[in-house]
Amino acid sequence: MTHIITSLCLRDSGCVDVCPVECIVPGMPQEKYPLYYIDPDTCIDCGACVPECPYEAIFSEDDVPEPFVAAGGEIVAKPEGTAGYDKEYTGENQHGVEVKLSNTKVLEADDEVDFDDEVKANYEFFEDGPGYWEGWEDHAN
């Protein structure tokens, strides 16, 4: 089993720093892969990444909410071109590096988000997508 980083991820990078097996990779190109992704073949399911995420975006695969129900104010990031995700987010990761995401949406209280596609997208990132792309370590924090 692995952990899944959901679209609540705003690329803080704290999860990367604590991963003992270095299996968390930032998506690239960011417009297509706006989140961080966890290699399911390498993840040892230690859970070290979960408390490091300030956005509470990481779940054990068996515990991914179906659906996620927003408290209100959460920001969700999706790939470029996703309908309804047209707000720009600008913030800083834990290292003080500016983070800009073009395709986000602020959730209202009781909005529901289906994370099922994100479990599939995490696996596809490593099976069919870029996975461990050259230079990823330099962009992970």
Image (spheres, grey):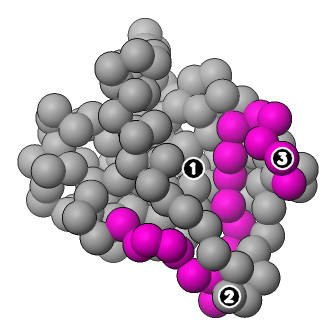
The reply to whether residue 24 is visible in this rendering is no
Q: Is residue 56 above or below residue 81?
A: below
Q: Which residue type does callout 1 highlight?
A: Arg
- State the separation of the CA atoms marked 1 and 2: 24 Å
Q: Secondary structure at mark 3?
A: loop
**Mark pair 1, 3: CA separation:** 21 Å
Q: Which residue is mark 3?
A: 83
Identify the residue position indicated by label 2 in the image.
110
Residue that carries the numbered disc 1 in the rendered image: 11
Sort mark 1 into few (<14), some (14-19) or many (20+) by Cα contacts within 10 Å: many
The reply, left or right, for residue 7 in relation to residue 82 is: left
Q: Nearer the viewer, mark 1 or mark 2?
A: 2
Q: Give x and y (percent) for residue 34.
A: 62, 39
Q: Bounds of the magenta span? A: 64-84
How many neighbours does mark 2 have within 10 angstroms: few (below 14), some (14-19), or many (20 or more)? few
Pointer 3 with pointer 2, Cβ within 8 A: no
Question: First in sequence: mark 1 or mark 3?
Answer: 1
